[in-house]
Image (tube, helix red, strand yellow):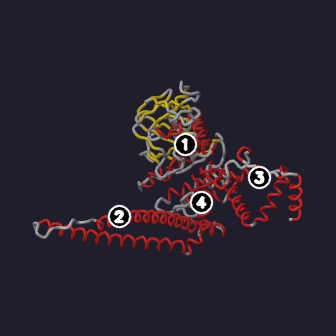
Amino acid sequence: MILELAVKEEPLYWGKSQPEDPRELIDQCAFYRLIGRFDTHLSNISRPMYIISNHRVILPEFNQPFTSWRDSPYTGAGFAHKQSRRYYFSSEFICKFYRFSTVSCLLTDKESERNRTELAHEEAFLKSPPSGLKVPALFTAGGNGEAGWLVMEKIPGELLNDVLASERHIDREKVISVLLDQLVILEEHGLYHDDFRTWNVLIDDNDSARLIDFGSIGDVQQDCSWPVNIFQSFIIFVNEIFCENKSWRGFWRSAPLSPFQLPEPYSNWLTAFWKHPVGEWSFALLQQLFSTKDALPAASSIMDASDLWVRAQEPVLLESQTQIRNTDARVVRLESQINELTSLINIMGESIQTFEKREYPPQDVTTNVQPRIEIEQSKAVDSEEIMRLHTQLNDAQQEIENLRHEIAKIHYSRSWKMTKWYRYAGLQYYLLRQYGFKQRFKHLLKRVLSNVIYFLRAHPRLKQKVINLLRTIGIYDFAYRMHRRMNPGSHNPYPNDPQYQSQTEKQILHPELLPPEVNSIFSELKNKR
């Protein structure tokens, strides 16, 4: 289907009824791509035209049906890319379709640039891969100002994180060895994978592992997230392979950063690597030590006091983070249950009122006895229904009270108070990633200025001194405009517009407009203050 969509900016009577983003009308469709923008005879505003399909990927040089699609790269990704990415699958190909803005407007400039960069890196890498590294065939790639796309050959296999979750037995030795071979090849060409995670590794039926997400491969030697150092990220990856039965849910990664929790000989291998100076760390060194791990000294024999402290503290920190996240989830769940029960109480209350207000017509005693019997039976049934609803209502109210007590106990518990700064740090990190540094700085500045304005309102004399100071240094108008922007509801929309001001208002704002005698008196009074 090809659709031309009207836009809100068009100067027609129905313009105001259009959504802010015309894509909102087609966002529930599986696939849509901007063809271009075209003028119409109705106005000088151009309209976007989209090609839409629920069954096919339709690109300039590629048109094939897909069997499934999703807007997350792997199970558990959640809202990682804010629904700016879509993935289309068939038995022959995988299509990645990344948008540079979303209907929800939640995508930050940094995240938009990441979408562009990853597609460009992946296209360049697949066109010219390092020798010795097997990669899928590239079918097509392209983009426009709104989105970019890439279609490549589908590699058989299953994501490593899904394999670990299914508790399928795998040859971990082989997986690590094969992945090290690939990481060393990349390193020899000055390339590094900045998102080395279990969901970016594909495992086939023979337990042969392959790196995917080639858009995350670049020449910068650092991870895309915490802990930034790619070798520390690799150690966490190895821990995740061996800690699949752990229920840790850390803020960033759910496995230890150190090698001390691993079984031998893998703890010996990574501890030997850990003991090298950070400047000497490389995947070539990891591979060299891996080949001799059985002959390396036991990790416990070369640990010092700092290593012992790290080994003791890491599980505690991960467990604390897990409890914080579980507690937060429990609070959200309890609040949701309270809302549901409150709605149920309102519905039952309305039902009770309906039953209680039901009227029965008076009956003549001389009439047939049967209708009176039926009415009495109906009254009895209604009374039972009212009693049942009252019982349910009381039970629901009691359950709400119990849930509120549970939440109160959580909020007043020592662990909740002790982990306050953990939760605050996690929230700030999440908000920083979601909105970017610029938006968070604006938010902080607005909060600070709001507190300053509130303080000045409570101290009129100080407020007047500040106003006089702003007038003296010539930035009063700017400060006043900022104040209006932050408090739009508390101001006349036309305070400084001469056509909306009386002569008195003008003279209050600009004393130089006062008659000379009055201005002289005003100046004397002002100086006396």
The reply to whether dot 4 and dot 3 touch (C-beta < 8 Å) is no
Closer to the observer: label 4 or label 3?
3
The reply to whether dot 3 and dot 2 touch (C-beta < 8 Å) is no
Query: What amino acid type should be assigned to the residue bearing mark 1?
Result: Thr
The reply to whether dot 1 and dot 3 touch (C-beta < 8 Å) is no
The reply to whether dot 2 and dot 4 touch (C-beta < 8 Å) is no
Q: Secondary structure at mark 1?
A: loop
Name the residue tied to disc 4. Answer: 427
Closer to the observer: label 3 or label 2?
3
Disc nearer the start of the sequence (2/4): 2
Q: Is residue 475 left or right of residue 5?
A: right
Q: Is residue 176 visible?
A: no
Name the residue tied to disc 1. Answer: 102
Name the residue tied to disc 2. Answer: 350
> Compared to 161, does 156 lie above or below?
above
- The quarter of the rendered structure image containing the N terminus is top left
In three-dimensional space, the C-alpha distance between marks 1 and 3, rounded to whole angstroms, equals 50 Å
Query: What amino acid type should be assigned to the residue bearing mark 4?
Result: Leu
290 and 5: which is toward the camera: 5
Q: Secondary structure at mark 2?
A: helix
- The quarter of the rendered structure image containing the C terminus is bottom right
472 and 134: which is toward the camera: 472
- Provide residue 447's location: percent of width, then percent of height: 68, 59
Q: How many neighbours does mark 4 have within 10 angstroms: few (below 14), some (14-19), or many (20 or more)?
A: few
Disc nearer the start of the sequence (1/4): 1
In three-dimensional space, the C-alpha distance between marks 2 and 4, rounded to whole angstroms, equals 40 Å
In three-dimensional space, the C-alpha distance between marks 2 and 1, rounded to whole angstroms, equals 42 Å
Q: Is residue 157 visible?
A: yes
Give the residue displayed 56% in from the left and 25% down from the top. 39
Give the residue displayed 40% in from the left and 65% down from the top. 341
Name the residue tied to disc 3. Answer: 504
Closer to the observer: label 2 or label 4?
2
